Amino acid sequence: MEVRLYLQMLLRSWWLIVLVALVAVTASLGASFMAVPQYEATARFILNPSAAITTSADIVRSLDTLDRPSVAATYVEVMNSQKIFTDAVVGLKLNPADPGLAKYTVLAVALPSSSVLQLSVLGPNPTAAAEFANAIGNQSISYARRVNSVYNMEFLDIAVPPIEPISPQPLRDAGLALVLGAVAGAILAILSEQIRMPIEALRRRNLVDQTSSAFNRRHFENKLEEEQARSQAGNTALGLIRLEGLFGLTESLPSILVQHVFHEVTRRLRNELRGNDIVGRWGEIEFAVMLPSTPSAAAERTFERIRLSLSQPIFISQTKESIQLQPIIGIIACESREPIANVIDRAEKKLVESHHNQMATFSGVVSG
């Protein structure tokens, strides 16, 4: 159920997902084309016992010691040191104070389960990056030979100028940005839906009568006023419906059953109406129905159907009882641009008149 709800949220906000993904791709491509290409030159070195060791016992001990991670880590620190970098720069006949050197990054690592070291130099010039890697390697080898005669470090692979930059890679970066943008858009879509839903619920709560699920009277009057301002032909019908059988219902039944009855009334009213017709809760036991763009004859037929529908009793299964709604309907035709106060006054007078007529008819039937 929750998965289906999230899918509905994503479908409603699909445009947000597409927008965020497109923004991410556009930003990625823009950054890729504006970025300075970076090239990585790599050299590899191997550690082995020094040729100065001649006895078999010393060779075995040196090999055993070489397996310790600390040995390779020491050489890695030497290659990463600022001293070795400065010596390499001087060896290349460059000025160590040149600010352009800050664009190059040196990283030496020990490859797992081996006595091989890898040195990488990253920078904007592929030739310079390779020269720096080889120069740092030579300086490291010279330094290691001076301070340690047990192990020997030598080139396994010299660095060559790379042909392709490692960054930026527009297609790869755009694809990654597309995926991340879509994920971010989906998250934003869900969050926006979760924020919007409480706002919509609060907004609807201000417009809808909670007991009946019909519009409350204030909103119904606003819709009626809008229709009156918009109508040119004056063919809007307004009907007020008093459900005499519900008088005193709120005092005699639990609130949940009262809500059930009023919801059923609203459901029956909507079943007899078109999509643009409006139902509202007018009073304690009164409802209002507005029929926009409806001639008088059609309005009379609609309210007759409503009367017949509401004349059917509502059965309450909890109490095993039936409630007779006893509908009384007053219908008027709104005149073009008629003030809303006049419309309401005429409709309420028509309802009172219909109520008196029905009561008089009922009294006559009882007397007879």
Image (spheres, grey):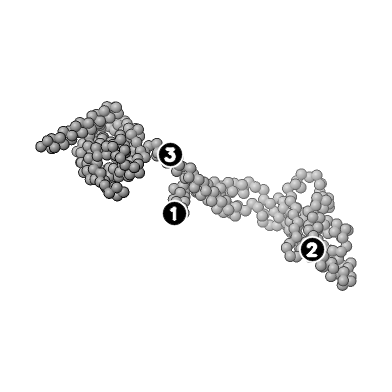
Decide which of 243, 21 is in the foreground and name it.
243
Is disc 1 in contact with disc 2, using a CB cutoff of under 8 Å?
no
The residue under the point 75% across, 56% down is: 108
On the image, the x and y values in percent for residue 8 come to 44, 50
Vertical arrangement, residue 160 with respect to residue 244, above or below: below
Q: Which mark is residue 68?
A: 2
Q: Earlier in the sequence, mark 1 or mark 2?
A: 1
Q: Which residue is mark 3?
A: 202
Say what secondary structure mark 1 lies in: loop
Tell me which numbered mark, 3 or 2, is placed earlier along the sequence: 2
Mark 3 secondary-structure assignment: helix
Q: Quadrant of residue 162?
A: bottom right
Residue count near mark 2 (Cα–Cα under 10 Å), binned few <14, some 14–19, many ≥20: few
Structural distance between the alpha carbons of marks 1 and 2:
57 Å
- Mark nearest the camera among 3 and 2 is 3
Residue 295 seen in this snapshot: no
Which residue is farthest bottom? Answer: 56
Can you see residue 121?
yes
What is the distance, in whole Å, between disc 1 and disc 3 at their CAs? 24 Å
Q: Mark 1 or mark 3, which has the lower sequence index?
A: 1
Give the image quarter of residue 109.
Answer: bottom right
Q: Position of residue 91 (x, y in %)?
A: 83, 52
Amino acid type of the residue tagged 1 in the rendering: Met
Dividing the picture into quadrants, the one containing residue 357 is: top left
In the picture, the disc for residue 324 is: none
**In this view, the mark in front (1 or 2):** 1
The residue wearing badge 1 is 1
Q: Quadrant of the C terminus?
A: top left
At 79% from the left and 60% from the top, the residue drawn is 70
